[in-house]
Image (cartoon, grey):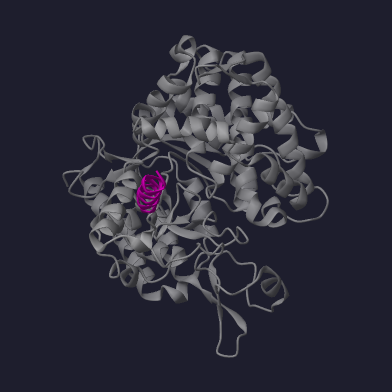
Amino acid sequence: MKKLFLILAFSILAFSCKDNKTSNDLSVDEKVESTQTMMQKNLSKYVNVKLTADLSALTEKEREMLPIFIQAADKMNDLFWYESYGDKSELLNTITDEGSKKFVKINYGPWDRLNGNASFIDGIGDKPAGANFYPQDMTKEEFEAAEIEDKSSIYNFVRRDENGKLYSVPYHKQFEAELAKVSDLLLEASMLAEDEGLKTYLELRAQALLDDNYQPSDLAWMDMKTNTLDIVIGPIETYEDQLFGNKAAHEGYVLIKDQEWSAKLARFASFLPELQTGIPVEDAYKTETPGTDSDLNAYDVVFYAGDCNSGSKTIAINLPNDEEVQLQKGTRRLQLKNAMRAKFDKILVPISDYLIDENQRKHITFDAFFANTMFHEVAHGLGIKNTINGKGTVRTALKELSSALEEGKADVLGLYMVQQLHEKGEIEGDMKDYMTTFITSIFRSVRFGASSAHGKANMIRFNFFKEKGAFTRNEDGTYTVNYDEMIDAMSDLSNVILTLQGNGDYDGVSKLVAERGIISSELQADLDRLSSANIPVDVVFEQGIEVLGL
């Protein structure tokens, strides 16, 4: 009996050791297979979408300009690679697995942007909070104490000299050769431009790339009203800098304006000053007057490059970011209609089939998704740009946390705008459509992960709304929207965010992010169900001159 027990014990031990084999015990073939399986799972988070548009309304010269715009935008890819990681070729040359190489290209580096920037390449550690904008060994305290030329500029790198002293390198010097080529392409396109506003903008943007003085071209871009083609290009958003939220990253969009849809949307911008007076916060936090020259337009996007093409893809834009331009001219809100439609069809609707109460799924509509996304961008113009207590701009006071809070503000004030305009009869449809689609969109955006400003904003909103009873989780794992409670939650969260912004309360925002910017185990289990059902998290584009048939 004792002998039999020893045999059984040995067998169990051997079986257990086999099952608990570590990665170091795997053979080369097993390691390759494990890597390939992981990469297949990673790549399945994205669904391929061909980025096309109707070119039939373009003039002959506009058709000539389009490939030039795409060539110019494409050059933003290499600049953003440097800002995000460093030497692209050096990294890719060390990777033999094609799936891993493809995933690196999607993420512009070895960190998964939809998984909290977790490293997925052996031997590479955590992503530096400051990406490649600063020395990796630099601390916040060292930077704040250092004497650096143009220290607060959003258009330079911080580097360390041979003696260890910090200094700055302007973008137009770091990328001198590359930007000279982009500038020449924009000037070449300007010679074809039939629209005077577009011609002026292209000439000024070409110069801005050479000297980092972007304000004149931003003002010209806002003055441009009748163009059909557009290109958004240069260092624009500061999301990539998660150390200070200050350095702008290069990106490019090539756009074709949908004149018919844009005409329908034009009237909404005129409501901004009126809506500003009614936002749910004390009067001291809404004394600024939004620019009345704002534009609201719909576009088909035909090319993404750089920052906007990394990880989760933007489906609406609100620019310029320059606070002085915003107060003087307002902003332009660009709704990327074809990209938006792709995400609605391939991601949002399948999510609703799993997570929304069956009786409320009829309220998931593209018109509501379009409106919620549109008014999110419009709502960036509401609220406050400068603190009320002398701490400077909200962006400066809240540092790396400013982007997440600003996105959260735009989310809830966007819904506030929908509600107000719906009551005025300015927008049609059932208000339940907008609210149900809004909640479903939270599930879509939360999947972007904690590394994304939009993801953090959505997690804060999800947890805040849950506490306020804006929705209920049912026993079958679906969610029911409680419409009256949702309106109250929207108002309460708007007040919290606008007050934090106006006070420049960095510690208060840090507490909000720490307490509510998290994914609970229950929510994570629901999100895992979406992954198990092979519902993609985001899109990756087949795009370019050949795809457009040019």
Residue lying furthest bottom: 163
Q: Position of residue 356 (x, y in %)?
A: 48, 19
Left or right position of 526 against 547: right
Residue nearer the viewer, 298 or 48: 48
Would residue 327 be found to the left or right of residue 103 on screen?
right
Magenta region: 1-17
Residue at 65 percent of width and 26 percent of height: 466
| In this view, 164 is above or below 103 | below
Q: Residue at x 73, y 46 (%)?
A: 511
110 vs 510, left or right, is left
State whether residue 228 appears in this view.
Answer: no
Q: Can you tell which quarter of the image residue 277 is in?
A: top right
Which of 460/3 is in front? 3
Q: Is residue 453 above or below residue 243?
A: above
Q: On screen, 221 above or below 186?
A: above
Tell me if I can see residue 311 in this picture: yes
> Relative to 503, is 165 on the left or the right?
left
Q: Is residue 15 magenta?
A: yes
Against 445, residue 237 (above or below) is: below
Q: Position of residue 485 (x, y in %)?
A: 68, 17
Q: Position of residue 371 (x, y in %)?
A: 49, 26
Give the tally of numbered discs: 0
Give yes or no for residue 88 being in the magenta stretch. Answer: no
Looking at the image, the residue that sits furthest to the front is 1
Q: Quadrant of the N terminus?
A: top left
Main SS, magenta residues: helix
The percent position of residue 264, horizontal first and vertical second, equals 44, 24
Rendered residue at 31%/55% (across/down): 35
